[in-house]
Amino acid sequence: MVLLHLPRLRFSILTSSHSLSAHSNLFTTKSALTTTEPIPITHFPETTVENPVQLSLEKLFVPPDTDVSCDSATLSTRVLKGSNIVLSKYARDAQVVQADFVKSSVRTEDCPSDGLPEFALVGRSNVGKSSLLNSIVRRKKLALTSKKPGKTQCINHFRINDSWYLVDLPGYGYAAAPQELRTDWAKFTKDYFLNRSSLVSVFLLIDASIPAKQIDLEYASWLGQNQIPMTLVFTKCDKRKKKKNGGKRAEENVEDFQELIRGFFETVPPWIMTSSVTNQGRDEILLHMAQLRNYWLKH
């Protein structure tokens, strides 16, 4: 697949730019979620790779206010498993203790007005948004799931620990939905992205069990062009398809997607591999959200 219409973008994970600075006491405050073993720098989860491939520094996502001047061996212990994300001193208070549905809205101005930081989940219809949300909070039915695409039709806010929000947005690309309804979804979703001041980051879900879709690449491009913070979340990474009829394994599709967008971003977007079936990537997402959230609150 060749993309000719995507402009080269400057990717920024936060809505305002901040220079990176060194801190010698990077881990003075530890996260509630920790690992007991070093996390290797790999393209894929450690359990699926016999010979892990190290990621070079330019392929890593380094959070603002994070020192990466250490040696590669030390840096490798700070990369979240199954991702390109370096763990920072802000990765704390990541546990989910309480999760509650708050409200559904069809206009940005109707969303909660308490100013708490929030993370939005968006992706193609039936990519697994609601399943991932349930996996993150360890609740089977917090967000309704359905085999029928287009189940989510509003901006749904879920308050976590009474201190931040997960937001489930309508899926895009559902051809069977009425044109008028698809237009409404696109309108209020984009309005939410552009005007929601408490939005910390969009988590764009990509189905890793199939090859890259043009609509996903275009969505990532639109977010980048509008300087909306974005993390790529690859779903369904537990599915292992044999290489028949051109099929590829999940990790191959993940790498292909990264290659397709790499030339259009000046800095690499953060990405995480996940599965709502095995809970792969659950803790990594929470740690990543925690460090983005805590940095956002401080600045």
Image (cartoon, rainbow, N blue to C red):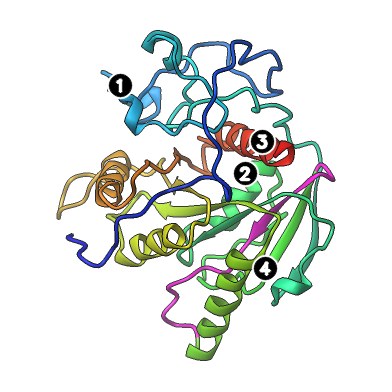
Mark 1 to mark 4: distance in Å?
39 Å
Q: Is residue 292 left or right of residue 211?
A: right
| Residue situated furthest left in the rendering | 245
The dominant secondary structure in magenta is loop
Mark 4 to mark 3: distance in Å?
25 Å
Mark 1 to mark 3: distance in Å?
27 Å
The quadrant holding residue 51 is top left
Q: Secondary structure at mark 4?
A: strand
Q: Position of residue 93 (x, y in %)?
A: 74, 29
The amino acid pointed to by label 1 is Gln
Residue range corresponding to the magenta coloring: 161-177
The residue wearing badge 1 is 54
Q: Nearer the viewer, mark 3 or mark 2?
A: 3
Q: Nearer the viewer, mark 4 or mark 2?
A: 4
Mark 3 to mark 2: distance in Å?
24 Å
Q: Is 42 included in the stretch rendered in magenta?
A: no
Q: Secondary structure at mark 1?
A: loop
The amino acid pointed to by label 4 is Ile
